[in-house]
Image: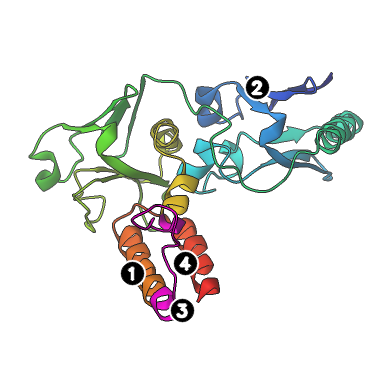
C-alpha cells in the first residue's frame, strides 16, 4: 500500500483503487470538502504525474474519458483549487510523492489498464439527496426529480412561474459553466421537447451563476444528474448504428449511391441531435468524423 498525507489531503493506493480524501486545512476549497472522499478504481485511470516546484509540488491524476460523471458534467472547467484529482505536495514529501507515482504507474502496467475512453461510468457521482443554493436559485436533486427554486435576485419573468420541477426522465443533458471574466456561469438542464436558447438569466431550466464562492457546488448537482443519465458513449453508438433491413440481416446501406445519401441523412440527424442538446460538442464531432470517413 502507498500513502501520502498532506495538509491538502490524503491519497491512499491499495493496488486496486485510490482513496482521495480532502484535507481540513483552511486553504482546501469548499467544493472539495463538500464532495468528500472519492474512491477511484484503478481501471478508471489513464495516468498519474508528479510535478516538482520551488515551493510546492503537485500530484495529478488523469482519468479515462467517460469514467467520471463529474468531469463530464463540468467539461473540465473545474479550476485548480476545486479539482479533486490534484494534490499539493510539500517539498519535504517529494520522495514520497515520487514513490506513490511509481506504485500507481507500475500497477497500471501490470494490470494492462488501457488509456482509451470507457463506455460506462466507473465512478458513482455525488451522493443524493443534494441541495445547493447559489446565484439566482437553489437546485435540489433526490435521484429522480430536480427542483429549482428562485430567490430575490432572480429575474422577474423567470421567477413568475414559481418553483420548477423537472423529472430525470425528461432531461437529455446537463451542463455546468463557471463564471469567467464578465461572463456569468450557469447550471442548465436540457429538457426533452423544450429546447431553449434563452440566456440562463431568463431560462426557467437554468440557474444563473455570478462567480461567488458556492458556484462550484452546482457542479455537484450536475454530476449527480449526469451519473443517472445514459452514458454519452451510448448516444454516439445510437447514431452510428445502421438501421436493420426487413430481415434484420441485410446491410442498411447496400449500394454506393444509397450509402452516400444515407450518410448525408445521418449527418443531418446528427446536426439536429446536436442542436437540441442530445449530443455534446465533443460527441457530435466524434460521430461526425466517423461518418465523414465512411464518405
Q: Name the image quarter holding residue 80.
A: top right
Q: Depth check: give the residue in front, 157 or 274.
A: 274
Image marks 1 and 2: residues in contact by CB distance under 8 Å: no
Residue picked out by circle 1: 268
Q: Residues within 10 Å of mark 1 (few under 14, many from 20)?
A: few
Label 2 to label 4: alpha-carbon separation: 43 Å
Looking at the image, tell me whether mark 2 or mark 4 is earlier in sequence order.
Answer: 2
Label 4 to label 3: alpha-carbon separation: 19 Å
Question: Of helix, strand and loop, which mostly describes the magenta segment?
Answer: loop
Label 1 to label 2: alpha-carbon separation: 49 Å
Which marked residue is nearer to the observer: mark 4 or mark 3? 3
Looking at the image, tell me whether mark 1 or mark 2 is earlier in sequence order.
Answer: 2
What segment carries the magenta color? 239-260
Residue picked out by circle 4: 288
Q: Mark 1 falls on what kind of element?
A: helix
Image marks 1 and 3: residues in contact by CB distance under 8 Å: no
Looking at the image, tell me whether mark 3 or mark 2 is earlier in sequence order.
Answer: 2
Q: Residue at x 33, y 69 (%)?
A: 268
Q: Residue at x 41, y 81 (%)?
A: 257
Amino acid at each position: 500500500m502507498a500513502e501520502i498525507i498532506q495538509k491538502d489531503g490524503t491519497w491512499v493506493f491499495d493496488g486496486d483503487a485510490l482513496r482521495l480524501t480532502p484535507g481540513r486545512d483552511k486553504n482546501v476549497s469548499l467544493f472539495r470538502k463538500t464532495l468528500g472522499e472519492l474512491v477511484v478504481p484503478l481501471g478508471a485511470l489513464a495516468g498519474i504525474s508528479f510535478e516538482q516546484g520551488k515551493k510546492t509540488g503537485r500530484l495529478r491524476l488523469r482519468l479515462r474519458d467517460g469514467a467520471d460523471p463529474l468531469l463530464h458534467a463540468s467539461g473540465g472547467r473545474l479550476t485548480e483549487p476545486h479539482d479533486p484529482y490534484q494534490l499539493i505536495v510539500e517539498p519535504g514529501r517529494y520522495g514520497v510523492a515520487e514513490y506513490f507515482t511509481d506504485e500507481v504507474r507500475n500497477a497500471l502496467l501490470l494490470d494492462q489498464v488501457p488509456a482509451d475512453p470507457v463506455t460506462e461510468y466507473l465512478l458513482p457521482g455525488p451522493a443524493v439527496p443534494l441541495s445547493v443554493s447559489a446565484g439566482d436559485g437553489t437546485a435540489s436533486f433526490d435521484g429522480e426529480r430536480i427542483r429549482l427554486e428562485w430567490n430575490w435576485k432572480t429575474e422577474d419573468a423567470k421567477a413568475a412561474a414559481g418553483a420548477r420541477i423537472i423529472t430525470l426522465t425528461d432531461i437529455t443533458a446537463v451542463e455546468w459553466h463557471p463564471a469567467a471574466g464578465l461572463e456569468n456561469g450557469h447550471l442548465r438542464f436540457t429538457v426533452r421537447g423544450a429546447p431553449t436558447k434563452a440566456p440562463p438569466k431568463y431560462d426557467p431550466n437554468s440557474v444563473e451563476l455570478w462567480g461567488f464562492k458556492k458556484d462550484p457546488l452546482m457542479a455537484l448537482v450536475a454530476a449527480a444528474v449526469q451519473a443517472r443519465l445514459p452514458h454519452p458513449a451510448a448516444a454516439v453508438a445510437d447514431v452510428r448504428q445502421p438501421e436493420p433491413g426487413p430481415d434484420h440481416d441485410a446491410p442498411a446501406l447496400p449500394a454506393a449511391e444509397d450509402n452516400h445519401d444515407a450518410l448525408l441523412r445521418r449527418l443531418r440527424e446528427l446536426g439536429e441531435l446536436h442542436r437540441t442538446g442530445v449530443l455534446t460538442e465533443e460527441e457530435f464531432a466524434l460521430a461526425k468524423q466517423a461518418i465523414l470517413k465512411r464518405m
